[in-house]
Structures are given as structure tokens and as C-alpha cells.
Image (cartoon, grey):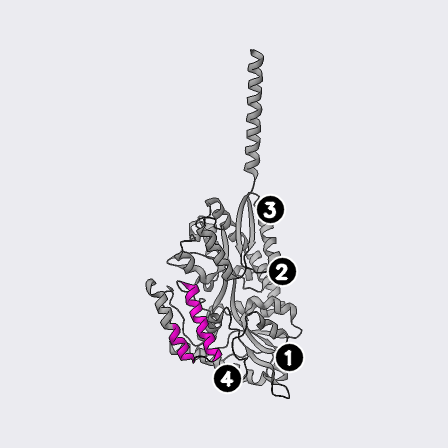
């Protein structure tokens, strides 16, 4: 009897120990934290992001940040919102700053302020450039953490400038100077075919953003701050689009719709002497240009220059478990610390998101050796928020289509913008 009791007690103790061991092993498993990142293919950027995730996980063994490469920005928001609706939301995703209203309307994200509880957290949240927060805050709340942010800049071939008798150390500063430079830089062969265009502005994917590089210096905004009204048919907007269209009519800019992705390639292949595109192309151009190139701020007109900001923010998804949300917040905070923001800027060409990043020894040294890297940052005081409204995908498509219609010559600038205004008003009626 006693022997049976002893054996039962021993078995119970062993079972308890096994159960405790399993519990401890289970407790030691890191928390999986899915992170959607917008890149279509592998390459240098995915290696950098993988490196950040690994370094964060080593420093925070309780978490396992897992990057999921989800395609373009447009594909990534579709995947993130689909996963959110199916109850399998990522903890966090880098999505366009302009997606803020869409994400709020879908009740997909939570305010970042909910996590910034300590004085240090609040100081970090106040440390970003105000120009980047314009697309990260609304209604008194912060919804996104600036990460891969940009402004639009002008890249120009200094050798081509010298050949055309232009100052290679001075980018065109006004629309008038830009038109004159584009004429001098346009080259033709014996048959009259253009071999080098003076200027090229892409018009697929982000046509609205490129239009903003003309409307901003013309001192007009495309939308109100609340994202409920647009001003496409404003005479200043029409004038800005007309300036672009006239560059094509003069033969100094390629006709029709120009691909976003081929524009840096055309610059590297000397098919275009000046291109207007994101500072996110800087590292690519620096690595591959076989000629000396300059980077200039956007040319001014009514006001001195001015570019829309652009790029992506971290967002935290509402349906993710609380522990995952907290991990996402810790990761966003960790990856935007000054030293990492500085390194990311050097690795990618994006603007470092805080003044503190530019005060780091590494970025100070880089800026002295490669001053082109500071142009996008120096433009921030005259930058405006990237175009963004409620139902942003639809309204942006309306504007993109209108810009392309004007560039294709199927509509005048005035008609294209008036038609776009009417359609955007219809889409936004319920938000007004």
C-alpha cells in the first residue's frame, strides 16, 4: 500500500516537473511579430531590413520581428488591409504616409500616442522633422512613425551642363531657368531625332506627386489638411500642369507618359540631362553614374522652390494582439534612433527623419564628403505634405489619369483638371 502511494506520488511529481519544463520552454519562445515591408524583389534593401530585424531580435530576445516582403506600396496596402479584414493583421507595416486617411477610415490602425507613455517616448515622438509629421498626424493624434521619407529633387548631369555652356555647380533655380537649360541640353542626331532630352519627369505611378513639384512652387495646394476637399481646377494648378505639357510640346521633354522605373536608367544612360524624381534614387545613381552629377532643389516660380514630402511610415495594426503591437512600437522606436536613421539614409538615399540623425558623426562626415545627400533635407523648410485625401487610392487615380491625359494630348490641362475635380468631388462628398 505504502509502496503504491510512493509510486503514485513519484509519478505525479515527475508529471508536474515535465509540465513545468514544458511551460518554461514555451515561455522562452519569442513572440512572432509579422512586419509587412514594401519591396517587390530581393536585393540590397531587403538585406538591410533583414539585418535590422536580426539585430533587434538579438537585443530583444522576447520578440521575433519577421519581415514579409509584400511587393509595391500599392500591393502592400492591399495585402495588409486584406489580412486585417480576415483577422490576421500584421503587427506593423511600412506604408505610404498618404495612406493615413485610408487606414483610419478602415479602422485598421491605432494611434502611436497610445504607446508613448514615458517622457523618453514622448521626446522621441517629438524629435521628427515637422514636414514629415504633416502626413503622420491628424485630429490631434499621431498615426504613423516616419521611416523611409523623401522629398523630390532634381538630378543633373554636370558633364552635359559644361558641354551646353551651363554652370555645372548650379541647378536651375526657377521655371524660366529650367526651360532655358532644358533647351540647351536637348541634343539631336543628323536625322533630327532626339538623343538626349533636356529634362524628364516620370508620369506613371506617382504622377500626382510629380505634379506637386510644380504646384508647390506655384504656391497652391492640391488638397485641404483634413483630406476632404481638392483644388484640381484651381487656375494655378492648371498653369503648373501646362508648364509640364509645354516642355513636351517644345521637344525638350519626351512625349506621352514616362515610366517611373526607367527615368533613373535614362539619366544613367545619358538619354536625359535632368531628371526630377525621389531622393530615394540617390544611392542607386551614386553607385551607377559614370559621370559627375549634381542634385538640386526643385525650381521655384511664385515661391522659392518647394517639394512635397513622400515615402513611408510605420503603422501599428489595431487587430494585432496587444503584445505584438507593443513589439511593433519598440521596433519602430529602435529603428528610428539617430544612429540607425543616419545609417539608413546613407544605405538607401532616403532623408534621415530627425535633426538628431544629421548630428551623428557618421552622417556629418558623409554630408561633407557627399553634399548631394543633404539637398533633400535642406528642402524640408519649404516642403508641403504629400497629396492625401480620404478614399486616397481612388482620388489619386483620378488625378494620375488626368495628368496622363494632358501629357498624352487627349485633353487640355484645363479640361483634364476640371473633369478630375468633378469626379473627386463626387468621391469625397460623403466625407464633407
- On the image, the x and y values in percent for residue 248 come to 51, 81
Determine whether the residue tagged by mark 3 lies in a helix, strand or loop.
Answer: helix
Residue ID at (57%, 49%): 56
Q: Distance between the residues labelled 3 and 2?
A: 21 Å
Q: Which of marks 1 and 2 is nearer the N terminus?
A: 2
Q: Distance between the residues labelled 1 and 2?
A: 29 Å
- On the image, the x and y values in percent for residue 315 come to 47, 55
Task: Report the residue marked by disc 4.
Answer: 249
Q: Earlier in the sequence, mark 1 or mark 3?
A: 3
Please state the extent of the stretch shown in magenta in the rendering.
391-420
Which of label 4 and label 3 is nearer to you? 4
The circle drawn on residue 257 is: none
Q: How far apart are marks 4 and 3 (CA)?
A: 57 Å
Q: Which of marks 4 and 3 is nearer the N terminus?
A: 3
Q: Which of 203 and 359 is in front in this view?
A: 203
Residue 69 within the magenta-colored segment of the rendering? no
Task: Report the residue marked by disc 3.
Answer: 58
Which of label 4 and label 1 is nearer to you? 4
Amino acid at each position: 500500500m505504502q509502496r503504491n502511494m510512493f509510486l503514485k506520488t513519484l509519478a505525479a511529481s515527475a508529471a508536474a516537473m515535465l509540465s513545468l519544463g514544458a511551460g518554461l520552454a514555451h515561455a522562452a519562445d519569442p513572440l512572432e511579430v509579422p512586419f509587412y515591408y514594401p519591396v517587390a524583389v530581393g536585393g540590397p534593401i531587403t538585406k538591410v531590413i533583414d539585418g535590422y530585424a536580426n539585430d533587434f531580435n538579438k537585443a530583444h530576445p522576447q520578440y521575433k520581428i519577421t519581415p514579409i516582403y509584400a511587393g509595391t506600396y500599392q500591393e502592400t496596402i492591399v495585402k495588409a488591409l486584406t489580412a486585417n479584414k480576415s483577422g490576421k493583421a500584421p503587427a506593423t507595416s511600412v506604408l505610404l504616409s498618404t495612406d493615413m486617411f485610408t487606414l483610419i477610415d478602415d479602422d485598421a490602425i491605432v494611434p502611436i500616442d497610445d504607446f508613448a507613455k514615458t517622457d523618453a517616448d514622448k521626446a522621441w515622438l517629438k524629435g521628427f522633422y515637422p514636414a514629415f509629421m504633416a502626413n503622420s498626424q491628424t485630429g490631434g493624434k499621431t498615426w504613423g512613425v516616419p521611416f523611409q521619407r523623401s522629398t523630390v529633387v532634381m538630378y543633373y548631369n554636370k558633364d552635359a551642363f559644361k558641354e551646353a555652356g551651363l554652370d555645372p555647380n548650379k541647378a536651375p533655380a526657377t521655371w524660366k531657368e529650367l526651360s532655358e537649360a532644358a533647351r540647351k541640353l536637348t541634343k539631336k542626331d543628323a536625322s533630327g531625332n532626339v538623343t538626349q532630352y533636356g529634362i524628364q519627369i516620370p508620369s506613371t505611378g506617382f504622377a500626382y506627386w510629380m505634379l506637386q513639384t510644380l504646384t508647390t512652387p506655384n504656391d497652391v495646394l492640391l488638397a485641404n489638411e483634413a483630406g476632404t476637399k481638392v483644388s484640381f481646377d484651381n487656375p494655378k494648378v492648371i498653369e503648373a500642369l501646362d508648364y509640364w505639357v509645354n516642355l513636351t510640346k517644345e521637344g525638350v521633354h519626351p512625349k506621352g507618359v514616362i515610366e517611373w522605373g526607367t527615368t533613373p536608367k535614362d539619366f544613367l544612360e545619358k538619354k536625359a540631362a535632368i531628371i526630377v524624381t525621389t531622393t530615394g534614387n540617390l544611392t542607386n545613381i551614386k553607385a551607377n553614374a559614370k559621370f559627375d552629377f549634381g542634385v538640386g532643389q526643385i525650381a521655384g516660380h511664385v515661391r522659392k522652390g518647394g517639394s512635397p514630402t513622400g515615402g513611408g511610415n510605420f503603422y501599428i495594426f489595431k487587430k494585432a494582439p496587444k503584445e505584438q503591437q507593443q513589439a511593433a512600437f519598440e521596433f519602430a522606436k529602435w529603428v528610428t534612433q539617430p544612429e540607425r536613421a543616419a545609417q539608413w539614409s546613407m544605405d538607401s538615399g532616403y532623408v534621415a527623419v530627425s535633426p538628431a540623425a544629421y548630428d551623428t558623426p557618421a552622417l556629418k562626415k558623409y554630408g561633407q564628403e557627399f553634399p548631394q545627400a543633404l539637398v533633400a533635407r535642406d528642402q524640408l523648410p519649404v516642403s508641403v505634405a504629400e497629396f492625401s485625401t480620404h478614399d486616397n487610392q481612388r482620388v489619386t487615380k483620378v488625378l494620375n489619369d488626368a495628368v496622363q491625359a494632358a501629357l498624352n494630348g487627349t485633353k487640355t490641362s484645363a479640361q483634364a483638371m476640371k473633369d478630375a475635380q468633378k469626379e473627386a468631388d463626387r468621391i469625397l462628398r460623403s466625407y464633407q
